[in-house]
Image (cartoon, rainbow, N blue to C red):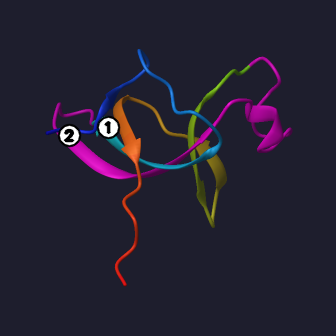
Amino acid sequence: MSNWNKYPDVTPPGNDAYLVTITTFGGSHVVRIASYTTNYSFVDEYKFHENLDSGFYDYDSEYGYYLVRNVIAWMPLPEPAE
């Protein structure tokens, strides 16, 4: 049973980190963690202009915040191991 939600048909319920599937330029798929926001201006007013709506983003220590593009599905992160 798959817990993946098709994006953008189904959006995450709130601002948090999620497991996402991304389509790469070569057509393959990568699974990684990305953050989701309902308003980019709350993340970084300078980097993300006010006209951007909700979506996925990440942070790079060298370049700062950036959009995570080509997300095709998402799911909540699993509970950590004990």
Residue 51 relative to residue 60: left or right? right
* Three-letter code, disc 2: His
As displayed, is residue 60 above or below residue 76?
A: below
* Three-letter code, disc 1: Ile
Residue 60 location (% of width, % of height): 59, 60
Label 1: state its secondary structure: strand
Residue 41 location (% of width, % of height): 81, 34
Residue 36 location (% of width, % of height): 58, 40
27 and 19: which one is in front?
Answer: 19
Q: Identify the residue at horizontal 39%, vertical 23% (top origin).
A: 7
Sequence-wise first label, 2 or 1: 1
Q: Identify the residue at horizontal 74%, vertical 30% (top origin).
A: 39
Q: Identify the residue at horizontal 35%, vertical 53% (top origin).
A: 32
The quadrant holding residue 4 is top left
Residue 7 relative to residue 42: left or right? left
Rendered-image quadrant of the C terminus: bottom left
Residue 64 location (% of width, % of height): 68, 55
Marker disc for residue 5:
none
51 and 76: which one is in front?
Answer: 76
Rendered-image quadrant of the N terminus: top left
Residue 31 relative to residue 51: left or right? left
Marker disc for residue 22:
1
The answer to whether the residues at label 2 and label 1 have Cβ atoms under 8 Å apart is: yes
Residue, far bottom:
82
**Label 1 Cα neighbours within 10 Å, binned few <14 / some 14-19 / many ≥20:** some
User: Which residue is disc 2 drawn over?
Assistant: 29
Q: Magenta stretch?
A: 24-51
Residue 34 included in the magenta stretch of the image: yes
